[in-house]
């Protein structure tokens, strides 16, 4: 009987057909079942709290980054086709309409771009060059248009003019640097506020659209060109440390507990279809294909030593119950 049960569950086409039918019937039954009958608040809470464990999260995140992410990135780097091929023209037009929506970019994003040492360094360099060129523009222009200008290398007047310009540059340089040191932060703040005031102008909208079009025109291989093994390893460390930190946050566990309580309170009396927003949808998932895909795993599980031991115990208990029933009669 034990051997027959194992064969009955795994061999031939009949078990596969029954497996498909079970998936089909289970799908319909689950959608009509209230959420409160499918989920127990206590067990879900316990499972959620158990999963938010720093050691578990760290151990799980490490292979995901080291193996799964590495393999996925390696395949994507081989893709040289533009990302835009996944988006039809109608979708791109809708995306551009969305990018043109007023208030899409929060002002704090702009302020963050214009804040910090890096922004000040770029501004200082650009302004220093511009102010230096502008400060010596007038003296140089005067030398060029003066009577001695064309003969600067021949007369003492021309040499004096060149010397004058050189001295002016030396005297102006510390003044410019002092001005930038004291005023660059204010200039950046005014630049940020000016940009914010124009953030929904046509030029700004065009900038956002062009940036998105640039990304869509590139391939996954281009966007992941710098994602070498060293970078993936470094990001793996970042992910692992961050995952551990998040798992150790006491407020996260409290928020998770509150979310589960609210979700079950608001959806406990609804059917699964209602809770998932699937009611009225006639399209069904490819249940037959999913059942066929899951069949090898199911058959392997049934034939595992642990499952065979469990089923053998069930058969023994069934035979014992039959003997007890005969004795009672």
Image (spheres, helix red, strand yellow):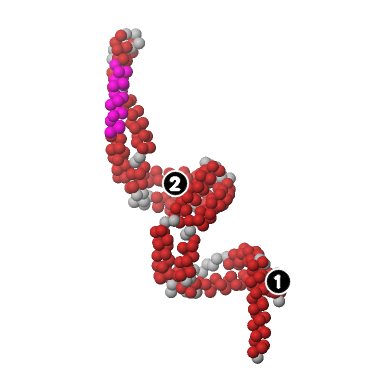
Image height check: is 162 above or below 85? above
User: Percent from the top left, x then y, of residue 84?
Assistant: 50, 48
Q: Quadrant of residue 136?
A: top left
| Rendering quarter of residue 249 | bottom left
Q: Which residues are magenta?
A: 164-182
Q: Quadrant of the C terminus?
A: bottom right
Residue highlighted by disc 2? 212
Q: State which tag comes first along the sequence, 1 or 2.
A: 1
State the image coordinates of residue 64 (x, y, percent, origin top left): 54, 53
Q: Answer left or right for 14 relative to 250.
A: right
Query: Which residue is pictured at 51% across the width and 57% down the height?
Result: 56
- The one of 87 and 64 positioned closer to us in this rendering: 64
Q: Residue at x 32, y 8 (%)?
A: 155
Of the two numbered discs 1 and 2 in the rendering, the one whose residue sits closer to the viewer: 1
Q: Position of residue 316 (x, y in %)?
A: 67, 77
Decide: is 71 above or below 3: above
């Amino acid at each position: 009987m034990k051997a027959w049960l194992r064969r009955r569950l795994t061999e031939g086409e009949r078990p596969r057909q029954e497996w498909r039918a079970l998936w089909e019937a289970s799908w319909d039954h689950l959608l009509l079942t209230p959420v409160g009958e499918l989920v127990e608040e206590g067990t879900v809470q316990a499972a959620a709290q158990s999963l938010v464990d720093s050691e578990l999260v760290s151990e799980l995140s490490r292979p995901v980054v080291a193996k799964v992410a590495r393999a996925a990135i390696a395949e994507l780097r081989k893709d040289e086709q533009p990302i835009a091929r996944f988006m039809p023209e109608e979708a791109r037009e809708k995306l551009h309409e969305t990018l043109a929506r007023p208030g899409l970019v929060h002002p704090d994003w702009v302020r963050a771009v214009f804040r910090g040492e890096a922004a000040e360094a770029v501004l200082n360099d650009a302004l220093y060059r511009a102010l230096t060129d502008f400060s010596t523009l007038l003296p140089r222009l005067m030398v060029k248009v003066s009577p001695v200008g064309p003969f600067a290398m021949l007369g003492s007047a021309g040499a004096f003019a060149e010397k004058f310009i050189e001295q002016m540059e030396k005297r102006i340089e510390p003044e410019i640097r002092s001005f930038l040191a004291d005023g660059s932060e204010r200039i950046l703040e005014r630049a940020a506020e000016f940009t914010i005031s124009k953030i929904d102008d046509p030029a700004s909208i065009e900038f956002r659209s062009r940036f998105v079009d640039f990304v869509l025109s590139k391939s996954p291989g281009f966007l992941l060109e710098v994602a070498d093994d060293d970078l993936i390893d470094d990001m793996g460390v970042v992910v692992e440390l961050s995952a551990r930190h998040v798992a150790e946050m006491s407020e996260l566990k409290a928020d998770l507990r509150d979310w589960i309580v609210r979700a079950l309170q608001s959806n406990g009396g609804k059917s699964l279809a209602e809770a998932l927003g699937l009611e009225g949808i006639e399209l069904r998932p490819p249940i037959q294909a999913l059942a066929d895909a899951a069949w090898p795993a199911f058959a392997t599980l049934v034939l595992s030593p642990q499952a065979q031991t469990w089923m053998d115990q069930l058969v023994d208990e069934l035979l014992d119950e039959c003997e007890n029933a005969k004795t009672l009669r």
